[in-house]
Image: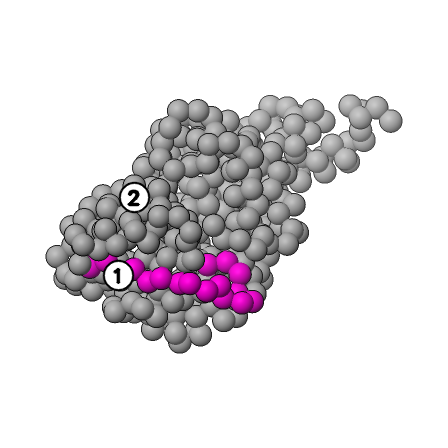
Amino acid sequence: MDLLHLPEFWKLTIFICFCVIIAVQLFYYLFFFNKLAQYKAPQKSSSLQYPVSVIVCARDEAENIARNLPGILVQDYKTTFEVIVVNDNSTDETKYLLDEFKKTFKNLNPVALTQEAKMIPGKKFPLSIGIKSAKYEVVLLTDADCVPASENWIFRMQDGYFDDKQIVLGYGAYHKHPGILNKLIRFETFHSALQYFSFALAGMPYMGVGRNLSYKKELFFNNKGFSSINHIPGGDDDLFINKVATKENTAIVIDKEAHTLSEPEKTWSNWQRQKFRHYTTSKYYKGKHKFWLGLYSLTQMLVYPLCIAAALFYVWWLALAVFGLRLIVQGIIWHNCMKKLNEADLWPWFIFLDIWMFFYYLLYAPALFKKPAKNWN
């Protein structure tokens, strides 16, 4: 059968399927993502400053510690804060660097681990030790390869606590460099944040990123820490938040001064390994989160194939008009969200980046079925 001469029933069916996919996409953009696009931080009549314990886990990260730790230690924070660096069996110069920093910064508290935790892969054990060592109720987590975007990072992140909030989700961005790989890495980071911030604002928080995440010690211990996910190498950030976050106890902070910055991977292969490692934990999310995230990913991936099919087999200008409606809504919402997350330079590329998402999902979908790697560093 000549594909260009399909029966009218099948041509109409293809077009209807395309319209359904676009309708679902518009629902996500208008109901979920528009919440971030329109978000304004809550106005407070008074603002408390809590003592904060910043926790960094490091294994053989001497170079990153030398580069990034000063940015944490010199934070402009009027209330007491400590910086706990858990040295997880490092064999490089980490110990000596921390000893030198300790001479100048009395609020630095190095914690040395000299034995591996059996049957607990990943960094959940060193992070648990760091949280147990924390003096203060509010803990603020970041990684050794991250540096705060400003000297007000601690202040901005802890300012997210109000009412009964016990979790504050932050944004872990990447440094901007020339090149297409840098843009794709930063876009993927933005796109993930678009989802977890928007879902949190819609009352359905499902993850955070360990590069910039805060919660209360009480919440951690009341939920027995990472005990339910100790067998999984990753998940110290997203799976823990997926377990304990609720509509009532979770807040977001997207102020540019509250971001952290990391150096992105320099090669495609390294980035691919990183993303495969991250995506292997999403299979353990709650069922409702997997449904909503999976439906969005599926419809995002089907937009372009069905658009092409509808344009070829049905009325091309009608197919393009339906697609154009989605593109306009998407462009407006992405523009507003990118501005809020300091990624506005990506917006001129948004059509290319939208097309890229089709290939991105094809590339990384197999990660959902792979066994997680055992190392965390």
Work out which residue is located at the far left of the displayed protein and give it.
Answer: 78
Residue at the (49%, 47%) spot, across then down: 28
Q: Is residue 34 above or below residue 355?
A: below
Other-residue count near label 1 (Cα within 10 Å), few / some / many at <14 / 14–19 / ≥20: many
**Highlighted range, magenta:** 107-123
Identify the mark at residue 84; answer none if there is no mark: none
Tell me how the rendering is colored: one colour
Residue at the (23%, 58%) spot, across then down: 108
The amino acid sitting under disc 1 is: Asn
Q: Is residue 368 above or below residue 225?
A: above
* Residue 288 lies in quadrant: bottom right
Residue of label 2: 66
The amino acid sitting under disc 2 is: Ala
Percent across and percent down for residue 177 are 37, 28
Residue at the (47%, 50%) spot, across then down: 377
Residue of label 1: 109
Residue 346: tell me if it is visible.
yes
On the picture, is 296 further left or further right than 107? right
Q: Secondary structure at mark 1?
A: strand
On the picture, is 213 further left or further right than 308? left
On the picture, is 152 further left or further right than 167? left
